[in-house]
Image (cartoon, helix red, strand yellow):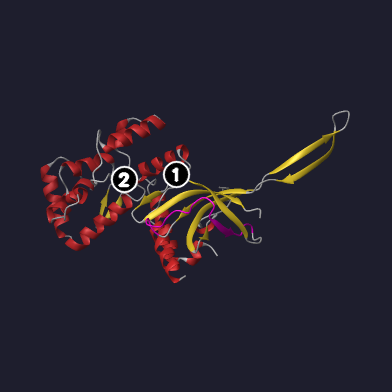
Amino acid sequence: MRMPTVNDSGKPFGSAVLTINGVAFVGENISIQEPSSTVEVRDEDGDPSGQITVPGFVTGTTTAQFASSATVAPTIGATFQYTANAGSALTYYVSEVGQPVAQMDVKKVTLGFRKKLT
Amino acid sequence: MSLLDQIPEYKQAAEQERANRELAFCGLPIPVCGLLSNVLTPRLYVRLWGCENAFVCGRDPSSEDIAMFLWFISLDYSLDAGERHRFVKHRASKLHTAEAIRGIYGYLVMCFQDAPRGESDAEGMQKSYTSGIAAIVDILAGEYGWGDKDILDMPLPRIYQYLRRIQMRRRPDLPIINGSDAVIGKWLQERNTAQ
């Protein structure tokens, strides 16, 4: 999770309500990586002469809190939509499910996800 | 819209938690039932447990439990029986019972706010091989090199925050649960029911 420079009023940073199969949960500490690959081209002297950068696979992680300890954690492949950086909503699918932790009636699990391509 | 805007009760609970965490480091006594008191430490906890005080043993508290609890955490605490008698007679016994119980439970909630909750086995009991205090000392001494005397006299709210930091560093994949998360859970239940 990226640390905010200023966090006025102690607002939770990077949290959002997400919905999987009609069940809402809160995703805390949502972190999305948008990597890229760059092909570097050099001339005969080895000096940079060109480059091509192409976007990579978009992945992310979040800590999901469910409505109660009885709520079943989402399975790999389950999809949800999330809007990052005030852009348009994108569809992601769950690619990793961590070890659930439950205390009292609160249940959380770390999820890894990837942006759906098609 | 942030969660704080959507769930006002969560905002209140989260702010209270945050204030408790900061206050744990101010090093000043706190008022409990109007009496200036020490924040609970592992050593104080063990003393109360050793005396089978109801507030740490899970029984319904009696007037004696209230008086002894407040005496053990009092800034005036000593082994002097006369001092204890004066404290009970002139201060603790003058408290309204229900208000005193509420005040002590509020104090305990503050002290144990960030405490890890253990998982019990199917029988509801966890096998014990050492004191829980030994586990705390072991982790903090091993991690920071502090001596056991310092750890035994450290306020529990500080100890539990250090334990959380250690867990966050060692097991960043393991979620941490706050008491205020229960408010979010309740809100999610209502939202899911309404959908």
Question: Quarter-wise, where is residue A52 in the image?
Answer: top right
Q: Decide if residue B173 is in sight here.
A: yes
Return the residue nearer the eye: A80 or B136.
A80
Residue that mark 1 sits on: B174
Query: Can residue A10 be seen?
Result: no
**Three-letter residue code for mark 1:** Leu
Of all chains, the one bearing label 2 is B
Q: Residue at x 48, y 43 (%)?
A: B173
Residue B77 drawn at (x, y percent): 20, 44
Q: Which secondary structure type mostly characterizes the magenta part of the structure? A: loop
What residue appears at the point 36 percent right and 43 percent down from the top-left corner?
Answer: B160
Output the chain of dot 1.
Answer: B
Report which residue position mark 2 lands on.
B119
Q: Earlier in the sequence, mark 2 or mark 1?
A: 2
Q: Is residue B82 left or right of residue A58?
A: left
**Magenta residue span:** A68-85
